[in-house]
Amino acid sequence: MKRIFIFSIACLFAATGYAQGFATFSVDGALTETVIKNPGKNSPGMVYVITGPQVDITNLSPKYKLLSGCSLENPLPKDFTKQADVTVDKKDGTSRPWVIRIKKLVPASLPFELKFSESNPAVFSNEAKGWAAVKTDETKSSVVRFGDTNVFFIAAFDAPAKELKFNLNVVGNAEFDGEFWVETSADGKKWKKLDAYSSSKPISSSLYTYPLLEDVRFIQWTYIERNKQNVNLNNITIE
């Protein structure tokens, strides 16, 4: 129940924040719930959608609703292979930029390694295979930076794997007092908790290793509740 509640809150940001933008947004074949981030009038709004590999993101017709009194300056594009930059106008004459990111998650072959660096940044791209991220801090692109509640990162692969390894650490080596989950899934929709970190089981800034069940094809890392600390993820190996 906790996961469902969290994603519902993410989709309500537009209704409770600066009221100029998207209220809802959906894509047929989406793998995850849409996340709408409406941080305030001085920052662009963000829409995040992750789809399965069968979705043709070059020819999409998303379903959406805008907040009351709002309209799109131009129609949405059909091709979402790159992020879409759109403008939402309001009846009072104001305008606000929005960014729509639709990531097609294509499973990678095993063994699968993700080692992010300056030359291999953890930045949105539909050319990237085997992973997708929502709300990660791309200004810290040499790692997967979790800097907010409801940030998540998914890895996908196409065959049975025996073992998962990854580095996880709290920025500044601070004492961890939030809640952070690692989960697995066979289909990318129904998730099972692999482990959870909290004040009673803090992140230890080390290499973590876990055995995987034969049917697992997806791994997800989620910052369930951030209090103060940012968290970095890197050096993921699935084999």
Image (cartoon, rainbow, N blue to C red):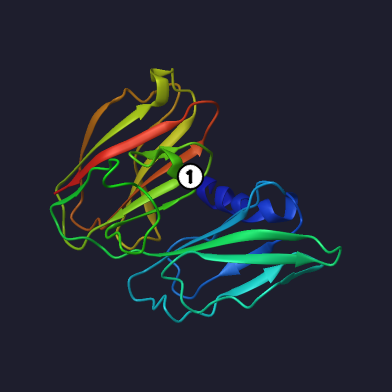
Q: Is residue 149 above or below residue 207?
A: below
Left or right of 105, for residue 72: right
Q: Is residue 21 above or below residue 78?
A: above
| Rendered location of residue 108, percent (x, y) | 21, 60
Nearer to us in this view, 128 or 181: 128
Give residue 202's quadrant in the image: top left
| Rendered location of residue 71, percent (x, y) | 74, 71
Nearer to us in this view, 34 or 73: 73
Residue at the spot of label 1? 151
- Tell me which residue sits at (44%, 73%) in the image: 29
| Rendered location of residue 3, percent (x, y) | 51, 48
- Tell me which residue sits at (85%, 67%) in the image: 91
- Tell me which residue sits at (37%, 59%) in the image: 125
- Tell me which residue sits at (65%, 76%) in the image: 74
| Rendered location of residue 159, percent (x, y) | 16, 61
Q: Is residue 199 above or below residue 144?
A: above
SS assignment at label 1: loop
**Amino acid under disc 1:** Val
Left or right of 100, for residue 239: left
Badge 1: how crowded within 10 Å, few (<14), some, or many (20+)? many
Q: Is residue 203 above or below residue 87?
A: above
